Image (cartoon, grey):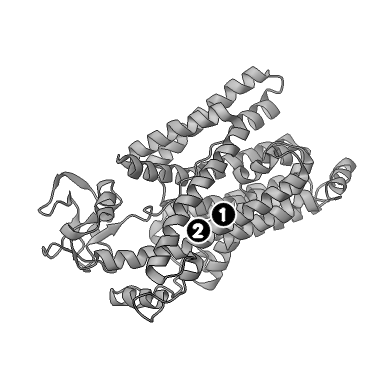
Amino acid sequence: MGWTGGYVLLALLLAPYLRKFGQFTVPDFIGSRYYSSVARIVAMVCLIIISFTYVAGQMRGVGIVFSRFLEVDINSGVLIGMVIVFIYAVLGGMKGITYTQVAQYCVLIFAYLVPAIFISIMITGNPVPQLGFGDQLLESPIYLLEKLDGLMMQLGFDAYTSGSKATIDVFCITAALMLGTAGLPHVIVRFFTVPSVSDARKSAGYALIFIAILYTTAPAVASFARLNLFETTHDVSYVEAPSWFKNWENIGLIAWKDKNNDGKIQYAKGDALQPTKPVYTDQRGFYGERNLSNQAHPSNANEVYIDRDIMVLATPEIAKLPAWDLIKKTFARRITERQELIYARISVLVSVIIAGLFGIYPPAFVAQVVAFAFGLAAATLFPAILMGIFSKTMNREGAVCGMLTGLIFTLTYIIYFKFIHPELNSSEHWFLGISPEGIGFIGMIVNVVTSSIVTSMTPKPPEHIGATIENLRRP
């Protein structure tokens, strides 16, 4: 709902107007609309923080995909991904990256939907995964979700369909994902590459359809995968375990510690290892499993460690925006096109190296890191863009203060609970019960309130800004 809804907002409220405004990047728009180089720089700082947060998860995903595809370790997969991204970003430019993403989507949708369709047919007989998700099983009259609930409760987990988060937290996470999708710079910049305003509207509409197909399949795939995990690995001899289990074990995304020495895989609630992350040795165990130096966790019967990054879609993107916004449009406006190209390539190289380091040393698991990026985009860029289009009175002082307060509030909240005091990262310590993944929505409110107050206390924007906005909103 969050990601798909974000494309609705993008199609209706942002993309056509941004294309009509005639700038090339989000900081370009903010700098021109708010008649301020300071606003441009603040937007660029927000963009860099958002982009590197986002790409930290994406590069980890690249490493996981390449590690499985080429049968190398994850760090080697990250390095391979870095080289490939650098090559197509340097040689292709902004339009090249756009066309590359079209190819990526074709590969993703085919690779994602074909297995989902056939698994849905095998389990429920329904060829539509979104419908098979709630259908009856072929071999019994019970429904898929009903069986999943029973299996999970049998193994000590909460029911699969039970909500583990408070309603307010779910609402804020969904809102942050929705507003963040509409404010993500690497998504918005795609609409700057189309020829006209009408093409921007059509592009957003097509994107909404194609994205909805992908995202609505995800819950079905998750339920099919969970059922398959329980039925093919629990209480099954390691020797007879499916090949995918051993393949993922070989690249470090699954670990097995035989606690009762019976040679069977036991899956249950709780951590399997102490410490939680597996530390592999060079030897193999009696059954051929990878040996671990970790101790078995004594408080439960679970023997399986599963990395939360095991299910990931990798769609890396590193744009050359720093060279354009920081150098060409701010600090060195008289540089030649050749110098701009050199700076752009250097910025891509630096970006790839930093992104690769984040991929090798990830701050959290992929989906969580990406959620942080969406929250930061919702709290910083989205309000500035939206009010820049629909408010004639919003001035540069309000926009700058709003972006800074939204960024500081959201980033501080995430860092405090995820890195400074992770032991306090629970609902009883969160502000209003809202997790770091959903705090971007509150950051957006803080941004809007701050910018409105500051605008009311500072000079109005020049008259030509009001005329520009009036013309922008005219069909």
**Relative to residue 451, is residue 142 depicted above or below?**
below
Q: Residues within 10 Å of mark 1 (few under 14, many from 20)?
A: many
Q: Tell me the residue at 25%/60% (across/down).
A: 304
Secondary element at tag 1: helix
Kind of residue sitting beneath label 1: Gly
Q: Residues within 10 Å of mark 2 (few under 14, many from 20)?
A: many
- Which residue matches tag 1? 375
Given contact means CB atoms under 8 Å apart, are the residues at marks 1 and 2 in contact? yes
Q: Point out residue 54 in the picture as x, y percentages from the top left corner.
A: 51, 46
Q: Earlier in the sequence, mark 1 or mark 2?
A: 1
Labelled disc at residue 30: none
**Relative to residue 134, is residue 324 depicted above or below?**
above
Between residue 402 and residue 229, name the one nearer to us: 229
- Nearest to the eye among marks 1 and 2: give it: 1
Q: CA distance from mark 1 to mark 2?
A: 8 Å
Q: Point out residue 182 in the picture as x, y percentages from the top left corner.
A: 64, 52
Labelled disc at residue 436: 2
Kind of residue sitting beneath label 2: Pro
Secondary element at tag 2: loop
Position of 153 with respect to 457 (left or right) is left
